[in-house]
Image (cartoon, rainbow, N blue to C red):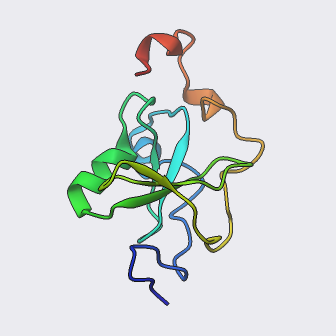
Amino acid sequence: MSAPNGIDLAVPPSGPGCVECDRDGGWWVHLRRCAQCGHVGCCDTSPRQHATAHFRATGHPIVRSFEPGESWYWDYSSNEMLDGPDLPEPQHRPADQTVPGPRDRVPADWQQYIH
């Protein structure tokens, strides 16, 4: 079922990490999940900012935090935080995944690369 506000309550997340960073061997700080298609991308603090790039490429305006203990939404169109429903499981990245992560791809000087 698809909600008219860009939140699809039937779509699971694309995976446990940023799709593009996983594909390219990159790393991230925090993860965001597209509420419309489930794409998991890295946050704007991360070096590559794939969640925002996904919004720009697709026009899907709403993301939800994909971090443990966080349930907030962000609307790129209005630049506002929103409340919303739970999405299909899982609600967040694996709890044992490091931040930044994944551990084996994060450089020792990672702070130099964040925004």
Q: Residue at x 56, y 72 (%)?
A: 12
Q: Residue at x 44, y 36 (%)?
A: 25
Q: Name the quarter where the C terminus is drawn.
A: top left
Q: Which of 76 and 52 lies nearest the eye of the viewer? A: 76
Query: Quadrant of the rendered structure where residue 113 is?
Result: top left
In this view, the residue in front, 11 or 6, is 6
Most extreme residue toward the bottom is: 1
Residue 30 drawn at (x, y percent)? 55, 38
Q: Is residue 103 above or below residue 23?
A: above
Please indicate whether residue 61 sits to the left or right of residue 91 in the image.
Answer: left
Q: Residue 73 placed where, x, y %? A: 52, 56
Residue 86: x, y in percent?
A: 65, 70
Residue 87, relative to residue 101: is it above or below? below
On the picture, is 47 further left or further right than 84? Answer: left
Coordinates of residue 37 in the picture (x, y in percent): 42, 71
Task: Tally the numbered discs.
Answer: 0
Q: Nearer the viewer, residue 51 or 22?
A: 51
Q: Residue at the left extreme?
A: 57
Q: Name the residue rendered at 50%, 64% in the picture.
A: 14
Residue drawn at x 54%, y 32% is 29
| Left or right, residue 47 beside residue 101 | left
User: Is residue 115 shown left or right of residue 30?
Assistant: left
- Compared with residue 81, is residue 108 higher up or lower down, i.e. above or below? above
